Amino acid sequence: MESFHWVRHRCQQLLAADRGRGWYSTANGLPNQNRLDAHGSLHRASKRRTVLARHGPHQKQHEALSKKYLRNAIRTTKYTCLTFIPKNLFQQFHRAANLYFLFLVLLNWVPVVEAFEKEITMIPLLLVLTVIGIKDGLEDYRRYLLDKKVNNNLVRVFCGTQKSYLDRCWKDVQVGDFVRLSCNEIIPADLLLLYSSDPRGVCYIETANLDGETNLKQRQVVSDLPQQGEDFTPESFHSRIECENPNNDLSRFRGYIEHSGGVRVGVHSRNLLLRSCTIRNTETVVGIVVYAGHETKAMMNNSGPRYKRSRLERRLNTDVLWCVVLLIVMCLTAAVGHGLWLKDLGDPVFQVDGETSPTLAGFYVFWTMIIVLQVLIPISLYVSIEIVKLGQVYFINNDLDLYNQEQDSRIQCRALNITEDLGQIQYLFSDKTGTLTENKMVFCRCSIYGVEYPHVENARRLEVYEAEGAERTEASGRSVSLKSSCSRKSLSCRSLSCNRSAVSLHTLTAESLEDGDGLSSHVQAKTGAFCSRMAKDVVPDPELVRKLDCLSSSAMEDSPSSLELSYIADFFLALAICNSVVVSSPGQPRHMVPETRTPLRSLEEIKLMFQRLNFSPFSTMPPSQTRGSPRSFAGRLFGRGKTASFTFPTHNDAGDGPESEPDNNQETSKLEEEKAARGEEPGQEAEQEAESDELLLYEAESPDEAALVHAARAYRCTLRGRSAQSLLVDLPGIGSLVVQLLHVFPFDSNRKRMSVVIRHPLTGQVVVYVKGADSVIMDLLETPAGGGQVEDMYNHIRQQTQRHLDSYARDGLRTLCIARKVLEEEEYEAWMKRQLVAESSIENREELLLESAQKLETDLTLLGSTGILDRLQEEVPETIHALQRAGIKVWVLTGDKQETAVNIANACKLLRPSDTLLTANCGSKEACAALLEELMDEVQHVGETSGADSSPGGGFILVINGRTLDLALQEDLKSAFLYVSCRCRAVICCRATPLQKSQVVRLIRDQLGVMTLAVGDGANDVSMIQVADVGIGISGQEGMQAVMSSDFAISRFQHLRKLLLVHGHWCCSRLTNMVLYFIYKNVMYVNLLFFYQFFCGFSGSVMINSWVLILFNLVFTSVPPLVYGVLDQDTPADTLMELPELYRAERTSKVYAPSMFWITILDSFYQSLVCFFVPYFALAGSDIGDLSFGSPVNASALFIILLQQVMESNTLTWIHVLVLVLSAVSYFGFVLVFGLFCTVCSHPTNPLGVETLQMSHPRFYAICVLTTATALLPR
Amino acid sequence: MMASSYNAKEEDGHHSGSSTHGGPGVVKSKKPDNTAFKQQRLPAWQPILTAGTVLPAFFVIGLIFIPIGIGLFVTSNNIKEFEIDYTGGTPGNPCYDCAKNLSWNSSTPCFCTVEFKLDQPFESNVYMYYGLSNFYQNHRRYVKSRDDSQLNGDLSALKNPSKECEPYRIVDGAPIAPCGAIANSLFNDTLELYHVASNGTRNLIPLAKKGIAWWTDKHVKFRNPGGNSNLTAAFKDTSKPVNWRKPVYELDPSDSENNGFINEDFIVWMRTAALPTFRKLYRIIHKKPNTTPTLPSGNYTLNITYNYPVLTFGGRKRMILSTISWMGGKNPFLGIAYITVGSICFFLGVVLLIIHHKYDTRSNSADIPN
């Protein structure tokens, strides 16, 4: 199975050299054109497509239209039975190597230069063509079978005649069909969602098949459908859908539905269900097919795998060019020699035609010699290298040390032809989060209202986990293992699907359909994404709990200020809702949100009161309005007589801040109410919560989101459900509340924040909660113009929070700031207008939306900050140390803060105490230039004094931030930056954007001409991974984008160590040795023929049967180098692991140097000299025939070549021995049998009886032994 | 169904986590097999050249090669060989006149006689060769110029020879048999050997003309068209090669087993020589049944029918008498080479042994060149 995948990959790669894109492009090109033309006549806007219901009233029209649309049947095969041979040949002849063979074949048809029988020169060509042809054919057949399977999948399609949904094959689905799908079914074509069993018209899909992301995505039923809400009846659907023509943009879909009344409703990508996605958590959906078959976005996105050329391959080309030069020199020698020889010749009896002038004859001989010596060009080397790389990849893939037990994932080699580049890496660029660290975010500390909550218990707990991590198997066996094993499986599922999607999208679909129970387990398993056990169990800080408890019972002695309490409550509310987390509970997998429970208390009442109290103290607070009597409120509402205390906060940290705000009272009263609300039915509620809590599972797009939600939940601020318009949140003391969700501005790396706009459930105000990187949030904070006290307090909170943030960063925590903004109704209305404009605009919707979001995210009120711990992965320091010892410069490129980055660098031993830290932070270009100048001086100075840059005291570590990096990457500062960074032992780039990451990698790669490796796990690393010579994706927590774009996908950073040090080293040395051996073999063999020319008047004669001649390289001596290339181990694995210096040695070793090529050539010259002249002198003057002379020469050559292999290889296993013996046996078997039965064949080198006679003669053996011994003696 | 399968999976996950490896049949883990092959831990022999392995190897090679070399050398030296050049390129040579006036077309044969003396008697079978020098029988165009099918008795090829035979394919509309340049340039000197007895009488030494070709050539590769019955009829409508004096079916009219394509002189000629200086077996002088030497020492005369021109391209013609051994003809090279290589090995072995002993403490493998 797996091997088949490689073959498939291989094949596609071979072909990818010829075709820029996948094969769909050709398949689609023509129909696309046609359709466009046809459309032009129907509509003025030719970029539209109209979809009508197939069984509706417009049936006629539908037929006319849909004729031009592709059906859902897909054909990804390249060939049909008929077209296979011509098409395959056509594609194969696009390769230079095959053209060379073809040229030789044609050359051999010219009578004057003909060297062999015509069929002989065709053998190499035919062999290569057949091998690749068979490979292609098998591959194509497999695709055909998969296509068939996919095409014959069943789906329920509405049938007009029977007025019901009937099972149909996928291939029979047409544009305009209504398709009904259930949960966990795979979408057969691109559908416009018309109905969902979900009452809110929402449907969830999982796009793992498409982009590897496992989080659920929401899709919305087309709005304003006439039948909205009730059961959808296809017969009544008379609307007409206009949408854009098929394209490959997954995230874009525009169009409108024109209802029968003429009303147009816009549809966009939120309404589109994409082919090969899976329906999740929704019972039934109905959609109308808009794109089918090859026109679906999934299919149009399906491009072939990547093709990279390894450096060795590039260098190989120069070697091959040298071989060509050598060939031409040899042929020229022969041509000139022949001309001169002819000139001096009189009128011999053996001259066949004496009329040709010596010059012309020489010219002919030149071409003849090219045919005769064709083996010198190691064409089969290319095929061999590919086979060897397949073998190497096989072994890398099967390495137990690169297997991750936890995730059940192996290393995936996605690019198969750069294995040996792993052994040449000089620069390693690493992402931090998820690469060096686990990316298992654990909420660790937080700071609210300027007060820090260190969560000591939490930290202690983490240590326990760390200890447990060592014996993970045990841990997962405990009672908690349900969740952890669940998440583990989800990961395995993901890597599985990724594996498959690497092959082909529709393949994947077929395979997931194949294993029925795998599918159902999939949905269960994936719900656990990002719910690592650690992230879930947050031990609340007692102090914070105490304060939070004040919300419910304010009876405590030193309860904090009400403002602080409101901050705390808002903080947790923000944590719980400001995210894109999807909630699901395994008990009810099909329903996303349980039916909204009506809160048990008189919520209306509370709300009312809150409105009156004016929940938010800072924005437009009219003190006079609520100055009234909060006590009385409380008393009136909750007559339990609990006393609220209004003591000022006495917390040590907040103590020095001004707390005597005028709104304290109001706040307290709010708390009072919450407390009271909780107090009503505390026991019952608690039980319910406890029960349902266990079942809630959060699926977040990023792990820190999940960590925050879990943290909020630990403080009983629980996110219970989510729909498009609302959120269900449990609040401590209040219970479940429905929070009306007005807008969500998802996280993007430019804004570095996300925000939600909600209508506050209690106050009814419109509140914006923003969560984002501290640097961004801090800039957006409001500057209160109000009274001095307020301002002071603000500044105090800000300063405190900033201080906490800095200390978090120093501890290596990821920091986030939470802020809030309360919007006035009018303000909101005004903004809403613009927002609506932005939403409805078609032209530059994205930019407008962004702008609109930015407008909203200003003048924020800082609530607090969080510190999330992201632990280092196991053995990261060891790995980094080993890599550095191996001479690899490790750069860390991260988007994190400088302090965090430096801290992580410290933790992973990238930074040693003895190192000098060079920090580059500057704002302007001039400053940057000056700084670089300064750094250069410093670096140079130290470099001079200590002599070498690898001084034992420690090197320099350059820390540069994103802004400076931007400046340093500019054209005129590049060289200075390079100069400095080259002399640093490591470079840490923080606050780097994805673009900058790739720029840095490109700069180093191009300017220094070194081999670079980039490793990362997230979408922000993709560009870097693609730019680097070797891109490695870590299949971690952040989806699969990095893996999809990588050449190798590993699951842990520590795997790099073995991958590079052992496999890289091996692959590199194996391949270089094999290539050299291959060249040696060819040169050595060809020289024998060349030397013979000196004794046959340079006429291009051969003394070896032409079949044997051709097959010698192709068959008899072709397998041993392959085995050598796959299995040889120059140094045992454990030695390589222990001595990373060997890696550096390998990289700089002479094996790779061009001189090695010439040494090899000289060696082969010597051996061929011996191999030719020993038999020559032994047989000179005797009655030896030409073939009889060739026989011992050839046999000796075989022995020499095979024994040379034995001496070259570092390890000999039984496989080697077997292959060597088989090679020799097959040679002798072939020549003997051939010599016995070939009576008139193989003109003019008929071998009849030659070998039998020779081998019965002791002289033959005497010659062979002597030749072999002499040739190999210098070794 | 969903729930049940979910539970099953959970169970599996549970077990695989807690037990050592998990049920292999139940959960299809992607864990690679821990086999020696897949983990590249196959037992391997590392051919590292250490003093311990190289030194014995050198000595063994030396000890084996030197005796073999001596044996070969002695064998080669025991072979008696006599060679006489009768090209007649220089005045004074008995064949000078013949050589001077020779051409392919001359109808009258030219005779010359060369006298020579054997100093030592030749025991056992004596092989008589003719040798040619500077004759490039291995020239590509020449080698190709033949039709194996025709020579194998194929009737259609007889009438319509292969194009490879051009320009010796058809003459005057009739196909040439045997066609091609090789056959056309058949060596056509006739050599006769006389022993001059002490009393001056010349005794013709019987020369066996059969048994000089390879068995496979004679019986498999070369066949007369239509069997050996009536060769004249079989070769009707064919023409003789242009340089030939007589057609192919008259090569040896006395013996039907040695006539036509299966004439052994012809077969021997058709097996092209590898090198420009070569000899070809001409006749065999069989050992006499009694103990007298096959060719006793004394004076001999060689009667040559001088037909074959070689001076035009600077060639030489020789007559060679030789006995052969199990190693073939006289050639001291192999023996000398074996002795040389063996000695070098032995010498190197000694040198390395000394080095090894001297520097043993430092390292025991680095001093071996490789």
Image (cartoon, coloured by chain):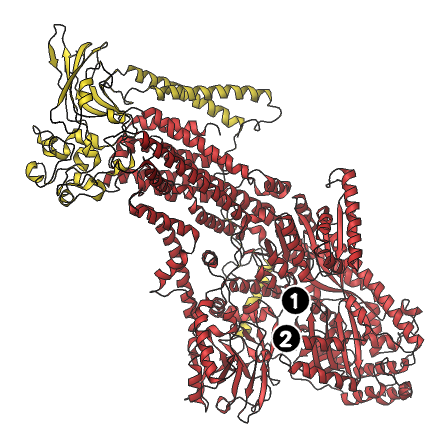
Residue A917 percent across, percent down from the top left:
79, 50
Q: Which residue is drawn at 55% across and 58% down?
A: B22
* Disc 2 target residue: A585
- The answer to which of A1136 and A782 lies nearer the viewer is A782
Three-letter code for the amino acid on which mark 1 is drawn: Phe
Residue A1272 percent across, percent down from the top left:
45, 30
Mark number displayed over residue B78: none
Residue A250 percent across, percent down from the top left:
56, 72
Query: Chain A colour?
Result: red
* Disc 1 target residue: A530
Three-letter code for the amino acid on which mark 2 is drawn: Ser
Picture quadrant of residue A624: bottom right
Q: Distance between the residues labelled 2 and 1?
A: 14 Å
The chain under label 1 reads: A
Picture quadrant of residue B101: top left
Query: Chain B colour?
Result: yellow
**Could you tell me if the residues under marks 2 and 1 are in contact, i.e. CB atoms within 8 Å?**
no
